[in-house]
Amino acid sequence: MLLGSATPALESWRNAREGRYRLLSLSERAHAQAVLPKIRLIDSRTDRPKRGFTSALTTALSERLQRGEQSLVFINRRGYAPTMLCNGCGHAFACKRCSAHLVLHRSKSAYRLVCHHCGLIERPPEVCPECGNLDLRPAGQGTQRIEETLIEQFPEARILRIDRDTATRKGAFSAMREQVEAREVDILIGTQIVAKGHDFPHLTLVGVLGADQALVSPDFRASERLFAQLMQVAGRAGRAEHPGEVLIQTAYPRHPLYQALLRHDYAGFADAALRERRGADFPPFTSQALLRAEARDEEAALGFLVAAREAGLGLGAGILMFDPVAALMARIANRYRMQLLVQAGARQRLQHFLNAWMPLLHAMPARGVKWSLDVDPMDY
């Protein structure tokens, strides 16, 4: 089996470092422009963004337009804005069925509030339901709002937005990609759909917006995913005869993740991340299994996991069982989601435990509860 990636999973990198996998490194690009794109960090504390864009990024986009080169503005948030806020009391519009905010979308001249988890759609109210204030405003930037801003700033530019809202129709994405390759697009706005695997030879600039959000995620894999995503999207720039440049807007330019990115140093980032994982007793230095339960009644889901934990505690030592807790997304479509984490220092010990635990789980009453066991979970 051949595993190929510019940003392999930390588990794969550890296996290569320890000799379980044979490591083959491609030190140069396979295209005419062998030099990797130059990465610049724009400190958004000093160069404050206006409608999402710092002056440095706006200037760089203008220069590419004048030279007839293409640019990519990368923001991994579709819709018009991540949410809508009341300017009076700060009320944010939440989904009635999920533990998430409604995302503001624009459809032609109308706006709508959409839940990206259950699909709920509502019309934005005219007044705040909490204080009656008329001053309701979009909060943050999404791909649609970025598109609107760029159209106003560069009316002469040919701008194309690629996200799930525009590329879901059959053949739509292929047609859009052909437009970019035919140089019928000056500025491309994209989400993770365009982050990797595409070769746009005339694209020389990538501007990254909103990357800092992943730095404060409760998911311990968030930094690994962010580094991989940024390194992959940076690889879209300068793939032919013209050199590429990547501008990342951030309030944390000294963060080790960004510093490793400046050097295109995946190995340095991965080794540092693995040291952190070892110190925190996180995978790949421990083996984990996650018992998930969901139900319309929160107490039913919690009760199932409590009983499952009691059954597991009687099976022997060497296994760490955490208390049942709510999932990071605690409710989706009016179903409550709980989880129980099981951890062991050795994979064989975890496998022996799961072989004994599974029959007990199947024998437990679970009326109204849907449960599953996820070994080596990637999401929590």
Image (cartoon, rainbow, N blue to C red):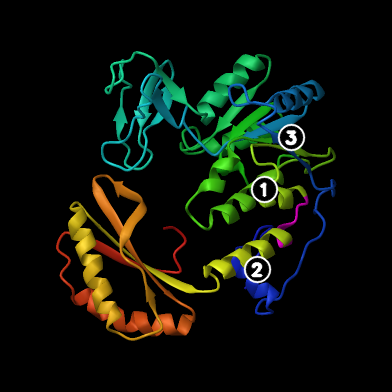
Horizontal side of residue 365 vs 236, given as left or right = left
Expressed as whole percent of the image width and height from the top left, the position of residue 241 reads: 85, 40
Going from N to C along the chain, the mark reached first, 2 or 3, is: 2
Is disc 1 placed on a helix, strand or loop? Answer: loop
Query: Would residue 41 be counted in the magenta stretch?
Result: no
Amino acid tagged 2 = Trp
- Can the viewer see residue 185 in this picture? no
Nearest the viewer among 4 and 46 is 46
Residue at coordinates 63% horizontally, 53% vertically from top-left?
A: 228
Residue 155 sits in which quadrant?
top right
Is disc 3 placed on a helix, strand or loop? Answer: strand
Residue to which mark 3 is pinned: 205
- Mark nearest the camera among 2 and 1 is 1
Q: Residues within 10 Å of mark 1 (few under 14, many from 20)?
A: few
Residue at coordinates 23% horizontally, 79% vertically from top-left?
A: 360
The stretch in magenta equals 263-267
Residue at coordinates 71% horizontally, 23% vertically from top-left?
A: 55
Mark number for residue 255?
A: 1
What separation in Å lies between label 2 and label 3 (alpha carbons)? 29 Å
- Can the viewer see residue 243 in this picture? yes
